[in-house]
Image (cartoon, grey):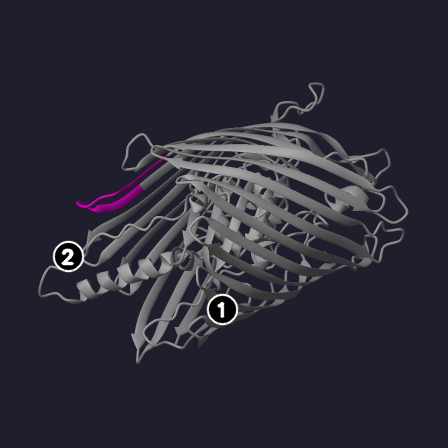
Amino acid sequence: MTLALVGCCMALTGNAQGRLDSVQHVSEVVVMSRPALREVVPSQKLSGEQLERLSSHSVADALRYFSGIQLKDYGGVGGIKTVNIRSMGTHHLGISYDGIQLGNAQNGQIDLGQFSLDNVEEVSLYNGQKSTIFQPASDFGNAGAVYIRTRQPDFSGGEKYHLKLRAKVASSDMLRLSALYEQQLTPRLSTSANVEFLTASGKYEFRYRRKRQDGTVAYDTTATRQNGDIHAERVELNLHGRLDQGGWQLKGYLYNSERGIPGAIVNNVWRRGERQGDLNTFLQAHYYRNVGDRFSTRWQAKYAYYNTHYVNRDTTQHQVDNRYRQQELYASTANVLELLPGWSASLSYDLKWNTLSADLYNFANPTRWSNLVAVATAIDYLHLKAQASLLATAISDRVENGPDASLHRLTPAVFVNVYPWRARFFSLRAYVKKSFRMPTFNDLYYTDMGNALLSPESAIQYDLGFVLSKHLQRGIISRVQLQADAYYNTVHDKIVAYPKGQQFRWTMLNLGRVHIKGLDVEAEADCNVGRDIVATIRAQYTYQDARDVTNPGDSFYDDQIPYIPWHSGSAIVGLQWRGLSVNYSFIYAGERYNQQENIKYNYMQPWYTSDVSVCWQWHHRKVGYRLQLEVNNLLSQDYDVILNYPMPKRNYGLSLDITL
């Protein structure tokens, strides 16, 4: 219903703009969503044309432009890419794909390099959690959340189908081919299919320069990155249905890849024999319905199967050829009731079943049952929006040839947003939240390394910030938004790998305690520079002070934890004139250390990259064309995100989109 009202408003506005002989007056229409669906704390978002203008291939690349995010990138097209939120670690960040979380019970890390932007409509980041009470119980348990929303078919003007073809060639012998087809079956039923093929040799030149502890140069040479090839196919099928006061979606997803793992450049070794094959599939369903004016319900289900094949043929190391198979079943219901105007309450329940098997000797073959129940309430009254939630989690593990384990936790959260003025262009926000992350199967049960006695990592977050958002009727600047947050986080019982006496023999222990202080700032502006010229500016800055305070007797006590820069940021500037657009993006990561001890030998210099893209769009006989040229790492800087994993120097890409 809300979408219909918005569509009518857009249609009226479009008709008014089409008649230039007189001034048209359109009556104001105010569309109000239910209090349960309104966010208490705004998110950071990249959507629509913003994503298209970035020189980004995957979701991980787009997340680099959010404040508070640290990306671990091991280099190249096929290199593994994971994200870390506010220095708490990858495992504390939930990743949702069309409303349902992606899981990896084996190691807890989601490789976002596997998710293309071709079919993505919006990527959003929430700190703490998505601050709406109408959500699955699992979403209440994250220290932060990324939501990936794919494109929904939208037909108008008698349209029955859409077809979008894309081809891209780039450095490292990269070729990407993709197609998106949308078909309207009935006025209330539509389908879409998105397929993609990617291949690349992964070869690129890099400079390798390392110094000894006495400051003399050990290596200084230029070489070519090897064993970074990738061949991948992705298929996504969707069925969308609309109902009176609701809708449903059925999604099937398949990702198949075979890639080399180039490994670290250490001791003058330039090539590794490691390879990895991934077959990731899932089928998920989503149904939601508004019952009357006060009650809404949502039901979700998912089955996922992940098959990982890891091979190490390096003759200088122990040769490995192993397969790991994961399965996941997930069911969820979320229900919200508006008790009084402006006051709502919700009840959510999630059930998860995870299992992992491997062809390793004496492997534990663990199975995990997770039950999550969340109760929440939200208030939207005059100058105040607030939300409180309590999540109860019960987890039970069963293993072969070992003791079973169980865990029960309660994790509360409170979010408050205050609007001092009625116009709501300025707001003050704050939240406090407790969360935890369960040890992964690898942490607990990996052969000769896991520790079944591990305790979960626990985190407490405190946040205080503001948002200023204003639409201006006069002047060059048409819209401006500024938001900033100061925060303090603590992580206890941090899980780390620790040597247990014998060389090459490690175990997992609860050793860590980390205190994190930080500041996130984000600014956006839209400007009308001249006739038909529109400029968009987006910038973000992050300050992180994340210190290990585990043991005062350690040499690294109160030192900055590895790979967390004190200062980082990014900027995006775009100029658009009719069908031509020019975009510039800049990313900066300040000084940091690659080991626990903050000494000169572990110091890593700051790095920054500049990317430029030029795009031309035009139509011919009802066919749309889009040609884009991009230059990445324009200044050809030599840098590592992760030590000894060199990133590409200057590289190029050319893409062509055809839309029918």
Q: Overall secondary structure of the magenta stretch?
A: strand
Quadrant position of residue 613: bottom left
**Image point (44%, 70%), residue name:** 188
At which x and y percent is residue 23?
11, 59
- For the point 50% across and 71% down, the residue is 192
Q: Where residue 627 appears, x then y in whole percent?
A: 38, 69
What SS does tag 2 mark? loop
Q: Is residue 391 above or below residue 136?
A: above
Which residue does the numbered mark 1 point to in the structure image? 169
Residue sitting farthest toward the bottom: 621
The segment highlighted magenta reads: 467-480
Label 2 vs 1, first from the N-terminus: 2
Residue shown at 48%/49% (left/top)? 295
Give yes or no for contact between labels 2 and 1 (Cβ–Cβ under 8 Å): no
Q: Is residue 530 above or below residue 344?
A: below
Q: Residue at x 50, y 36 (%)?
A: 590
Residue type indicated by callout 2: His
- In terms of secondary structure, where does tag 1 sit? strand
In the picture, the quarter occupied by the C terminus is bottom left
Q: What amino acid is at disc 1?
A: Val
Q: Residue furthest top?
A: 552
**Residue tagged by mark 2?**
25
Query: Can residue 203 be seen at all in this image of the molecule?
Result: no
Circle 1 crowding by C-alpha within 10 Å: few under 14, some 14–19, many from 20:
some
Foreground mark, 2 or 1, reads 2
